[in-house]
Image: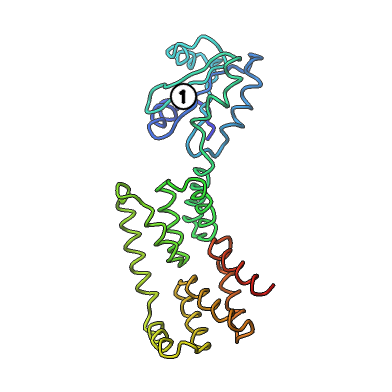
Amino acid sequence: MIIQITPENFRAELIEASMTKTIAVYFYADALPECQPVTPELEGVIGTANPVLTLAKVDVSNPQLQSLAVQLGLQALPALVLFKEGRPVDAIQGSEQLAGARQFLADYLPKEEDLLLEQGRHSLAQADIQNAYSSVQTAHQLAPTRTDITLLLVDCSLQLQKLTQAKELLALIPMVAQDSEYQRLVAALELATQAADSPEIQALEARLQQEPDNGLLKQELAIQYSQAGRKEEALELLLSLLKQDLGFGDAKKIYLDILATLPGDAIASRYRRQLYTLLY
């Protein structure tokens, strides 16, 4: 966010807001030539949609705001003061120091995985599960040990019926991070797993044990697996069919249809390569 501080809002937008978010308070005066190039640079560095850092601009040309600069002991303009939890924690002042503002703010700017995580949360709130999954999956690749990212990826995986992936991701969560959200997702996975083992699937599995070479049974079981979210098992079953007979029934079409439901998925990439190996 980028906000303009006034005598009326400075307590709410600066002191109170800094309890939950870092506020970069920029002291300037438009009439000073040394401030003119700094203002647009800071606005560009922090941006209008920054999830972790707000730029609060204080125009000291306003006599009512000059006292704030005096209280902070500022001796030169432009100046940048970082507020956290209602108090200043760091500052730079003067045009020479402000030239290094980007480096000064580096530790307070969001990392790429933070931005992707926020995108994922926003997409999830809009019920755009596929885009949420894509954003959070990329964030997880950038920061595989971040439990908040991993848990959100589990949530997305469950909603997309990627049960195998959800189970693998939950196994990565250390004991110390197994909080209420972790427990909720474990319970959700158990329910989804039970739902994915329907009587129809159990019956087909029992028949296939008796007729292990029945290709039509394998094809039907693969369809049932896919519909229950057991995509990897479905692909593995179909691949075994295609290795025996590349033209068997609708196996190749079903295989490709399942791959199409897994865009950008690591499992899809692996099984797509295996199919290409058979074709070419």
Residue drawn at (46%, 22%) of the image: 7
Residue 274 horizontal/vertical position (percent): 60, 69
Colouring of the image? rainbow
Question: In this picture, is 184 found above or below 9?
Answer: below
Q: Quadrant of residue 254?
A: bottom right
Quadrant assignment for the C terminus: bottom right
Q: Relative to the observer, which residue lies in front, 67 or 199?
A: 199
Residue type marked 1: Leu
The residue where tag 1 is placed is: 82
Question: In this picture, is 172 found above or below 43?
Answer: below
Numbered label tally: 1
Q: Relative to the observer, which residue lies in front, 255 or 39?
A: 255
Residue drawn at (52%, 38%) of the image: 50
Question: In this picture, is 33 found above or below 257?
Answer: above
Residue 204 horizontal/vertical position (percent): 42, 86
Question: In this picture, is 110 found above or below 279?
Answer: above
Residue 68 horizontal/vertical position (percent): 45, 16
Q: Quadrant of residue 41?
A: top right
Residue drawn at (52%, 59%) of the image: 128
Residue drawn at (36%, 83%) of the image: 199
Mark 1 secondary-structure assignment? strand
Residue 64 horizontal/vertical position (percent): 48, 16
